[in-house]
Image (cartoon, rainbow, N blue to C red):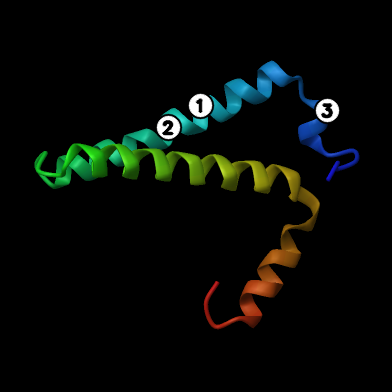
Amino acid sequence: MKLKNTFLNTVPLKARIIFLAGIFFLFCTLGVAGDMSEMGREPTARYILMTLLISVFAMGYATAGVMMRGQSWKVMVRCASWSSC
């Protein structure tokens, strides 16, 4: 599916990669903070998986937010009509 005239399509690829890498590394700190709250007792596999999942979901959320800039109200209306979103 090719989106027409979205902000993300007008930004150069290198800038998009830098933006998403920044989001990734920013949210990696949440995985580190979660491990610190457990005093380092989390298994290594869980720590890595948790950190990667948090970061990848944040990247997807940021991408969706940029792509739906003018239509974000539709998501809010739809979520408000459901009991949980």
**What residue did someone put label 1 on?**
22
N-term mark: 3 or 1: 3
Counting from the top left corner in percent of width and height, residue 9 is at 81, 31
Q: Residues within 10 Å of mark 2 (few under 14, many from 20)?
A: few
Name the residue rendered at 59%, 21% in the picture: 18
Q: How crowded is mark 3: few (under 14 residues within 10 Å), some or many (20 or more)?
A: few
- Within the image, what quadrant is residue 66 found in? top right
Type of residue at label 2?
Answer: Leu
Q: Distance between the residues labelled 3 and 1?
A: 19 Å
- Extreme residue in the right direction: 4
**What residue did someone put label 3 on?**
10
Type of residue at label 1?
Answer: Gly
Type of residue at label 3?
Answer: Thr
Q: Is residue 73 left or right of residue 18?
A: right
Q: In this view, does 70 lie above or below 33?
A: below
Q: Is residue 36 left or right of residue 69?
A: left
Kindly check if marks 2 and 1 are in contact, taking CB atoms under 8 A apart as contact.
yes
Q: Residues within 10 Å of mark 1 (few under 14, many from 20)?
A: few
Q: Helix, strand or loop at disc 3?
A: helix
- Within the image, what quadrant is residue 34 found in? top left
Name the quarter where the N terminus is drawn.
top right
Counting from the top left corner in percent of width and height, residue 13 is at 72, 20
- Within the image, what quadrant is residue 35 found in? top left
Q: Distance between the residues labelled 2 and 1?
A: 6 Å
Q: Helix, strand or loop at disc 2?
A: helix
N-term mark: 2 or 3: 3
Name the quarter where the C terminus is drawn.
bottom right
Foreground residue among 73 and 85: 85
**What residue did someone put label 2 on?**
26
